[in-house]
Amino acid sequence: MSGNIVRFTDTCNTQSIAKTKIIVTYFTEKGCGMFEIRKGNRFILAFVAMLTFALVTKLNLATVSQEKRIAAQSSCNSGDKQLERIALFERGKGGYKNYRIPSLIVSKKGTLLAFCEGREGGDAGDIDLLLRRSEDGGKTWSEKQVVFSDGQNTCGNPCPVVDQDTGRIWLLTTWNFGGDDEDDMICWKSKDVRRPYVCYSDDDGKTWSTPVDISKTARRQDWRWYATGPGNGIQIRNGRYKGRLVIPANHSYTETRDDVFRMSGKYGYGAHVIYSDDHGKSWKLSESITPGCNESTIAELSDSRLMMNMRNYNGKKCRAISISSDGGATWSPVKQDETLIEPRCQASLISYNRDDKNLLIFSNPAYIADRDNLTVRVSKDDGKTWPIAKQVYAGPSAYSCLAVLPNGDIGCFYEAGVKRGDSDEVIVFEVISMESLSK
């Protein structure tokens, strides 16, 4: 590895994620080393900060070389299996200026599918939907492939779901004119609206059908801005609605209430789901979850109810929650989960049902000020409490997506960086052992 690369790794207590010390790991052409800084020694911390800038001529992640995996292990979990990290998409490499919006799912055959957006700019403009596949649990990956592209227009927000009955992989996504940005769409100043699309694969993600616009049944006329997920959908496993495919989504709408969150005077953010009871042949729309709810993620609870976990615009730096008792058609009033702190960002929520365990697993940047400190939490009581928290990456980090791997461990596909305030230099795939999440 050429150049001098420094990585800071905060060790943690898996119960409270309290920082107890700082381990500085440095990488050079001649090798690597490590030293420890005890918490509270501000003089040494200041010295390390200056040393970092002196050593590093080009900041980059030591853990995210495109072709090399570097094993990282938290010193507070010395008995854990190693956490393997590999960068699947790296800014400026592979034909795109930037990559964002990770989505991860495991097919019925056990193949890992890692989606993201390949961008030429920011959230608008020329954006393609990309995919890499792994048939060995994330050890090796295919070259990237383009799933959805439309010239200079925007094709993004991947949200796949696997139909376990048929094996078909459905991919819900969105499209808009490249010249239209979110603000203009919300305020009715854009050329067109953002539209939901769907496509599918019957060969484990190797090829995909032509995406189809499903706006007629999956979008209301007042919803100018629209986003699927991003993340992944679910298929309900138990109960009256068993087999239903459910996709979390969000939208803008005209808000008439004066005492809730509004943009530009009269527009709000809401969440909803798209669902199918006929294996994807048709898609229906749920009622809206409002006010102040945006990017959403969904999981099935132990009693077959559904939990929607949402980016929050209600004046709280924590996640917004809503519950459905009818398979996602209707939703309870919004509540706040003040344990799940956030700087206002996307997150991921999945259910884990293996080895007699019935858990919820959640990931997000657990810090109220900035997109830092990507953390995975575990709930054993359907989200009432979150007693286990494990820091995955201490530095700048943003969007993430979780999936249960074929061996029972957890795959975490997330955006990360090194420079302060730059949380999406790369999109990293990391394996987190269930053993480390059980302590």
Image (tube, rainbow, N blue to C red):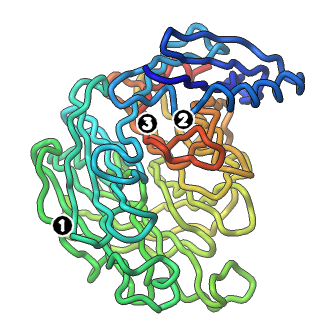
Q: Nearer the viewer, residue 222 or 358?
A: 222
Q: Which mark is residue 58?
A: 2
Mark whose residue sits in front, 3 or 2: 2
Which quadrant: the C terminus? top right
Mark whose residue sits in front, 1 or 3: 3
Q: CA distance from mark 2 to mark 1?
A: 40 Å
Which residue is depicted at the point 39% across and 38% down? 403
Q: Quadrant of residue 180?
A: bottom left
What residue is disc 3 on?
A: 428
Which residue is depicted at the point 24% across and 24% down? 136
Q: Sort mark 3 into few (<14), some (14-19) or many (20+) by Cα contacts within 10 Å.
A: many
Q: Position of residue 252 (x, y in %)?
A: 50, 79
Mark whose residue sits in front, 2 or 1: 2
Q: Secondary structure at mark 1?
A: loop
Which quadrant: the N terminus? top left
Q: Give amino acid for label 3.
A: Val
Q: Quadrant of residue 224?
A: bottom left
Q: Which mark is residue 128?
A: none
What residue is disc 1 on?
A: 211
Nearest to N terminus: mark 1 or mark 3 = 1
Tell me if residue 50 can be seen.
yes
Q: Nearer the viewer, residue 289 or 324?
A: 289
Q: CA distance from mark 3 to mark 2?
A: 19 Å
Looking at the image, is 437 positioned above or below residue 164?
Answer: above
